[in-house]
Amino acid sequence: MVVVQDPVAVADEGADVQGDVARPVHAQHVVVVVIRHTSAALSDARLEGVLRTTRASVRSGDLKSAYARLALNGVGRSFFTKWFAAVDDRGPDADRALILDVRVFRSLNALGWSSREAAGVGHWPTRYAVYVSTMHGWARELGVTAEWLEWLLFDRNGRVHDGDER
């Protein structure tokens, strides 16, 4: 049995995410939501082909194309960007794929950063590619890895200023 008490974790699994904001989902719906979305993804006839083509796009550095091609029932941005990060085996000099979920978005938005404004368009594949390149640029300036910076934003979950409650 899956028990998740944090509605953000539920939203992160693909439930009711609208743009950059997740609508709260009641805990009693968690198991049903996770099972429904997992079943939908695993039974999607496109699964194998989509995973192969997106893996190839990520490994060639074409994150925009990978994002545009990932269309599976029950699978949203939070999960498929995890897929991108997992299969990106390019070297340390490449701007490797990063996870983009509601917690990272919450921190970026709290810092005043908008993927739409940074990309100059509402096109999600472009916005994801700009997010990745921006994070790698910030990481180089700070002398850290982009993966560490992404984790920090995830961990902070929008609490980015002194005095923000934990």
Image (cartoon, grey):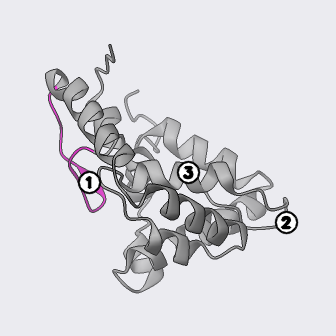
- Please state if 4 lies on the left or on the right of 32 as rendered: right
Q: Is residue 119 left or right of residue 73?
A: right
As measured in the structure, the alpha-carbon distance from the residue carrying label 2 to the one carrying label 1 is 32 Å
Q: Position of residue 105 (x, y in %)?
A: 41, 54
Numbered range of the magenta stretch:
15-26
Residue carrying label 2? 93
Q: Nearer the viewer, mark 1 or mark 3?
A: 3
Q: Taking 1 as reference, is 7 above or below it?
A: below
Residue holding disc 1: 21
- SS at mark 2 in the image: loop
Amino acid type, label 1: Val
In magenta stretch: residue 123? no
Give the distance between the C-alpha atoms of the residues marked 1 and 3, in whole angstroms.
21 Å
Instruction: Give the labeled residue for mark 3.
Output: 83
Query: In the depicted view, which residue is nearer to us: 48 or 9?
Result: 48
Q: Quadrant location of the C terminus? A: top left
What secondary structure is marked by label 1?
strand
Name the residue located 35 percent from the left edge and 47 percent from the top edge: 41
